[in-house]
């Protein structure tokens, strides 16, 4: 007889909304997460829940989600009191977030850090405190818990609040971890947008995930009569966390503060909120366009809804349209990642990446989603540098014309890379996980690969590819806007598989090159070298032609004049950004050379940034 196949997803229960009225009242839902074999923890291929309570100094019993008693009920029921449910919830939401990235990016994201840390660790009760954060050194997300304030809105005073029971906080922190895996230099505050992007983007992912919970969307669409721009749990983040820390409102919202401008807003969450608002302005616009016909049909052509409850069929159609639009917008926001420069991101770069990535996949823009998004960014005052207009053609990254195709050695390796990544991406069933022997040799190096020694023929394909890519970059350094005099590190490369809305399959190779200049200039006042970083992302078609080279060059007189000028002004901007912080820091005059070198990362790290909110 045929064995019965494992399903590709596993149902697990979570709290969909923050339990503002107590955990009993929170909306409980079941979500489908990737089905993989799990050890008690849960411990899967990429995620590992470690339930050590750093305050109580104890390990809690780890849940075994493959226990038949738990499998039969589709996961444990939500419970505030049972740490095993907390473990399940953290795992479920983290896994769902990861799957959203896998799907949108068209590859299976590798969370491993080198060969030692193959999984991202999630600690649901890591410490006592009003905080939760991703720590890149520990390769872990740490969730705190605390007692609610006396004046804590709808929380029972002094009730224990677990940040690990908030979908929004888990999704937000998980996004930080994934973004750090995709772009490790986005935790370096080199301009006002870099960390604000990390924060804003993490909120964008958490917010859009709300729309994948059908019960929640149905309820809110009915309550708000289809108007998504009214404050609802759909577009507000971490309600309970905001109330519990006495701020009297939800932590952040997709609506943003319409008076906030980039010129005056420097705090990273507030600045990130401008990015969130720009993306959601675009989303609301597309959503309104998409439901206009439905409403017109339902109202006999008038488009004016009668007072009272929405007609149930209409509410259902509107809700599914909202979910579909949100999912598409989330995919678009994530997909842009491959089209971002490897260092020193600005919101303007992100808009250009969004527009280019979506254009490559869906040139026709049948939903008008790109133009709505551009309008959203415009209305929030986000303009990319060096772009003459906000017309779509000028926002798209220019296509490359002066680069030779990839070398033969790279072309030979490409099919192997495609095969390995295609296997990783498609073999998601449990059976495949069990029978597969070991991980394919594609794990990203812990540090940028230093490709100065050619690999031996027997070495794994990732080493050989990194070598071939860096030789290509060395041979074409100036055309790639890299400095031929500096080491070129390969900071990541992947084959990606994306399906356009037309059904067309798009296969590409994306790779990032990074350069660090530590020696050419010494800060005259501080006496320490000024560290400068530049880099280029390339997008290569399956035929070996380089389609895009998205660069943040380092100054070099050999570069074309506009590129060199923009490199010089980029580093000037970085200096003045750092000196603003120096001017406000009373300890600055007393720092040792080591402290000076590390001062920006000490001032701005995710733990400190999340502490206040
Ligand atoms: Zn954050």
Image (cartoon, rainbow, N blue to C red):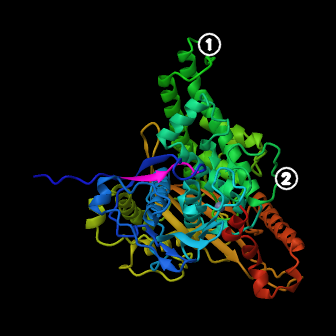
In the image, is the residue at mark 2 within 8 Å of ligand 1 by its beta carbon? Answer: no
In percent of width and height, residue 413 lies at 40, 66
Q: Is residue 545 above or below residue 253?
A: below
Lateral position of residue 405 relative to residue 412, left or right: right
Q: Tell me the tag on residue 431.
A: none
Q: In this view, does 276 lie above or below 48?
A: above
The quadrant in which the C terminus is found is bottom right
Q: Residues within 10 Å of mark 1 (few under 14, many from 20)?
A: few
Label 2 secondary element: loop
In percent of width and height, residue 358 lies at 56, 44
In terms of depth relative to the viewer, which is nearer, 536 or 248? 248
Frontmost of labels 2 and 1 is: 1
Cα separation between marks 2 and 1: 43 Å
Q: In which quarter of the image is residue 583?
A: bottom right
Q: Is residue 101 above or below residue 355?
A: below
Image point 51% across, 23% down: which residue?
A: 314
Q: How many marks?
A: 2
Q: Is residue 130 above or below residue 393?
A: below
Lateral position of residue 335 relative to residue 195, left or right: left
Q: Quadrant of residue 409?
A: bottom left
For the record, the magenta segment spans 11-19
Lateral position of residue 326 relative to residue 110, left or right: right
In terms of depth relative to the viewer, which is nearer, 452 or 331? 331
In terms of depth relative to the viewer, which is nearer, 325 or 156? 156
Image point 63% across, 17% down: which residue?
A: 304
Q: Tell me the tag on residue 263.
A: 2
Q: Tell me the tag on residue 302.
A: 1
For the question of whether residue 373 can be seen, the reply is no
Quarter of the rendered structure image containing ligand 1: bottom right
């Amino acid at each position: 007889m045929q064995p019965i196949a494992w399903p590709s997803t596993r149902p697990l229960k979570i709290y969909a909304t923050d339990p503002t009225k107590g955990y009993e009242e929170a909306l409980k839902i079941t979500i489908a997460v990737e089905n993989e074999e799990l050890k008690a923890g849960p411990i899967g291929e990429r995620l590992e829940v470690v339930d050590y309570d750093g305050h109580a100094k104890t390990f809690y019993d780890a849940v075994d989600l493959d226990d038949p008693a738990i499998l039969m009920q589709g996961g444990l029921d939500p419970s505030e009191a049972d740490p095993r449910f907390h473990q399940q919830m953290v795992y479920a939401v983290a896994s769902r977030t990861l799957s959203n990235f896998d799907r949108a990016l068209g590859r299976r994201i590798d969370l491993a850090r080198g060969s030692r840390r193959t999984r991202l660790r999630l600690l649901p009760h890591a410490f006592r405190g009003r905080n939760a954060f991703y720590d890149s050194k520990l390769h872990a997300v740490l969730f705190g818990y605390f007692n609610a304030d006396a004046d804590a809105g709808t929380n029972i005073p002094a009730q224990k609040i677990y940040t690990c029971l908030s979908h929004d906080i888990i999704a937000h922190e998980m996004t930080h971890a994934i973004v750090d895996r995709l772009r490790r230099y986005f935790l370096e505050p080199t301009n006002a947008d870099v960390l604000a992007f990390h924060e804003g983007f993490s909120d964008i992912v958490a917010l859009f995930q709300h729309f994948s919970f059908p019960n929640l969307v149905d309820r809110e669409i009915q309550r708000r009569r289809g108007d998504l721009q009214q404050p609802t749990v759909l577009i507000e983040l971490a309600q309970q966390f905001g109330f519990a820390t006495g701020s009297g409102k939800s932590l952040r919202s997709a609506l943003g503060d319409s008076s906030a401008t980039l010129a005056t807003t420097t705090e990273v969450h507030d600045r990130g909120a401008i990015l969130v608002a720009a993306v959601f302005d675009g989303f609301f616009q597309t959503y309104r366009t998409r439901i206009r016909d439905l409403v017109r049909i339902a109202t006999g052509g008038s488009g004016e809804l009668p007072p009272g409850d929405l007609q149930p069929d209409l509410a259902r159609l509107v809700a599914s349209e909202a979910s579909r639009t949100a999912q598409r917008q989330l995919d678009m926001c994530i997909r842009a990642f491959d089209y971002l420069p490897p260092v020193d991101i600005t919101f303007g770069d992100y808009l250009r990446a969004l527009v280019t990535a979506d254009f490559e996949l869906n040139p026709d823009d049948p939903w008008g989603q790109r133009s709505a998004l551009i309008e959203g960014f415009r209305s929030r005052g986000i303009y990319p540098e060096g772009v003459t207009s906000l017309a779509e053609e000028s926002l798209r990254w220019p296509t490359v014309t002066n680069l030779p195709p990839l070398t033969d050695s790279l072309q030979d390796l490409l099919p192997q890379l495609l095969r390995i990544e295609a296997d990783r991406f498609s073999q998601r069933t449990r059976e495949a996980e069990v029978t597969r022997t070991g991980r394919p040799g594609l794990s990203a190096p812990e540090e940028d690969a230093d490709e100065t020694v050619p690999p031996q023929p027997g070495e794994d394909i990732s080493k050989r590819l990194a070598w071939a890519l860096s030789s290509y970059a060395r041979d074409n350094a100036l055309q790639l806007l890299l400095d031929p005099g500096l080491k070129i590190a390969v900071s990541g490369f992947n084959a990606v598989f994306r399906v356009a809305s037309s059904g067309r399959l798009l296969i590409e190779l994306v790779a990032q090159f990074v350069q660090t200049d530590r020696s050419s200039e010494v800060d005259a006042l501080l006496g320490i070298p000024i560290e400068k970083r530049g880099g280029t992302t390339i997008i290569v078609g399956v035929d070996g032609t380089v389609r895009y080279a998205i660069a943040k060059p380092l100054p070099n007189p050999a570069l074309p004049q506009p590129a060199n000028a923009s490199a010089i002004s980029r580093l000037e901007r970085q200096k003045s950004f750092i000196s603003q912080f120096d001017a406000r820091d009373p300890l600055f005059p007393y720092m040792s050379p080591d402290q000076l070198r590390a001062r920006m990362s000490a001032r701005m790290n995710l733990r400190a940034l999340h502490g206040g909110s």
